[in-house]
């Protein structure tokens, strides 16, 4: 057993005589077992004569601790300089453990040792592993070759909205929906020895049941949350056996979702401000105020919505369609100039009656929902904004989004109101000039 150990080991009795010397110690220092076992003391061969008494005392000091002492050290670690058989000197990191007989009397010590630098490297690696899986400022998740989670730190569990213990032994598909293919591809390439050379930006959607979210408004179902994780991948191999088969992959990432959303929001706002400015300059050159109103619709749609409907109040109080953007909807006859018979409670009528923006999202049968609201069949989300000018509501401006787009939010409603103010002013001017 001693010869098969990876650590170098020697044993001393209570007088300092060498009683054991394994093969690893022989390879490390060059002294054979026959040369070492039975020597009285360490001076003159393993350590300098001047240091022999001090080093022997330090190695045997672990015996001075009574086994019954609750706070007494069961082992001691220290650094000692040793000689190799070729005369060179090397600093060793040694751990000594007391050996006692059945009655608790000391009979000697075992001393496991290795090169101090190598031992320090090992301890640093272990400390690094503990730190990464502890309170590291970024997420760390380890998966085995079957892509099942074997370890996860607190930051990673928080980013994925999951308890650490719930992830252990589970595949990542249990916690992630959209973006899972990209993540698993990166993990598999890393297992094959081809990890991404640069950090990868992954957008992952967490399963709704992991978020504990309530169903969203308008019957849209559970809320899903997307996270932006800047990720790196490291292949894990055994430093002991040298086996070429990897032990798994370390997925190291930082959650940059908030920063990304702030950046996207700022870029979106800059674009929208630019569109409003461009629309105002183009409308200023229109001799017909109604053409200026339609121009505002065209400039508002890019990146915001697929369709826009401009309805103004008629003589009977109903709404009359005067413009559509981007023109007549696929295959439909033009409804310009016709009274739109919206049913009671329609979002456009609510916007006119209450003079506030109204947001709506289709239910389970969205095509029927759009048809019932007299909107294009591909409409799934709507924003109806009142047209106001000189203290009066002149109609409603409706923006529509199709499949694959998110519902309108409060920032969208604020932008819709900005567009509606400009359109409302143009409609009011057209009426003053008798053109609407």
Image (cartoon, rainbow, N blue to C red):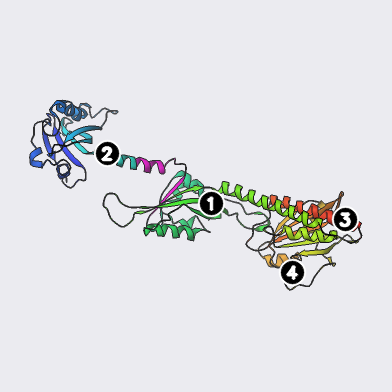
Q: Is residue 140 above or below residue 400?
A: above
Tell me if I can see residue 182 in this picture. Answer: yes
Disc 4 from disc 1: Cα separation: 36 Å
**Residue 374 locus on image (x, y percent):** 76, 66
User: Does residue 184 show up magenta in the picture?
Assistant: no
**Residue 12 locus on image (x, y percent):** 14, 33
On residue 429, the disc is 3
| Crowding at mark 4 (Cα within 10 Å: few <14, some 14-19, many 20+) | some
On residue 147, the disc is none
Label 1 belongs to which residue?
228
Q: Give, as a single range, the part of the protein colored magenta.
A: 126-144
On residue 117, the disc is 2
| Upstream in sequence: badge 4 or badge 3 | 4
Element type at mark 1: strand
Residue 119 is left or right of residue 353, and the answer is: left
The image quadrant where one finds the C terminus is bottom right
Disc 4 from disc 3: Cα separation: 27 Å
Disc 2 from disc 4: Cα separation: 75 Å
Element type at mark 3: helix
The answer to which quarter of the image holds residue 280 is bottom right
Tell me if I can see residue 352 in this picture. Answer: no
């Amino acid at each position: 057993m001693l010869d098969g150990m990876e650590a170098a080991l020697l044993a001393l009795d209570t007088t300092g005589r060498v009683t054991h010397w394994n093969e690893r110690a022989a390879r490390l220092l060059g002294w054979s077992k026959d040369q070492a076992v039975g020597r009285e003391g360490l001076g003159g061969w393993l350590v300098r004569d001047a240091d022999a008494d001090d080093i022997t005392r330090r190695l045997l000091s672990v015996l001075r601790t009574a086994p019954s002492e609750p706070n007494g050290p069961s082992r001691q670690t220290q650094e000692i300089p040793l000689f190799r058989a070729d005369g060179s000197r090397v600093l060793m990191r040694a751990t000594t453990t007391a050996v006692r007989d059945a009655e608790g009397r000391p009979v000697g010590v075992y001393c496991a040792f290795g090169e101090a630098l190598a031992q320090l490297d090992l301890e640093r690696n272990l400390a690094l592993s503990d730190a990464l899986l502890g309170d590291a400022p970024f997420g760390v998740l380890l998966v085995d070759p079957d892509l099942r989670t074997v370890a996860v730190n607190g930051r990673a569990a928080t980013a994925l909205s999951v308890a650490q213990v719930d992830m252990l032994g589970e595949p990542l598909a249990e916690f992630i929906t959209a973006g899972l293919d990209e993540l698993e591809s990166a993990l598999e390439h890393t297992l094959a020895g081809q990890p991404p050379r640069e950090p990868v930006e992954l957008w992952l959607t967490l399963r709704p049941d992991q978020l504990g979210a309530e169903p969203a408004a308008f019957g849209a179902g559970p809320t899903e949350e997307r996270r932006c994780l800047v990720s790196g991948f490291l292949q894990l191999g055994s430093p002991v056996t040298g086996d070429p088969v990897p032990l798994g992959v370390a997925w190291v990432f930082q959650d940059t979702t908030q920063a990304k959303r702030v950046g996207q929001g700022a870029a979106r706002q800059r674009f929208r401000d630019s569109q409003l400015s461009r629309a105002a300059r183009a409308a200023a050159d229109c001799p017909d105020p109604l053409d200026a109103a339609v121009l505002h619709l065209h400039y508002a749609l890019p990146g915001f919505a697929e369709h826009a409907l401009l309805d103004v109040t008629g003589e009977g109080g109903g709404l009359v369609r005067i413009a559509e953007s981007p023109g007549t909807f696929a295959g439909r006859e033009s409804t310009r100039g016709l009274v739109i018979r919206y049913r009671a409670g329609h979002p456009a009528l609510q916007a006119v009656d209450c003079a506030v923006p109204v947001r709506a999202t289709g239910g389970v049968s969205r095509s029927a929902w759009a048809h019932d609201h007299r909107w294009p069949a591909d409409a799934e989300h709507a924003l109806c904004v009142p047209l106001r000018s000189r203290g009066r509501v002149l109609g409603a401006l409706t923006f529509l989004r199709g499949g694959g787009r998110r519902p309108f939010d409060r920032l969208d409603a604020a932008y819709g109101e900005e567009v509606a103010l400009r359109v409302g002013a143009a409609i009011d001017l057209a009426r003053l000039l008798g053109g609407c």
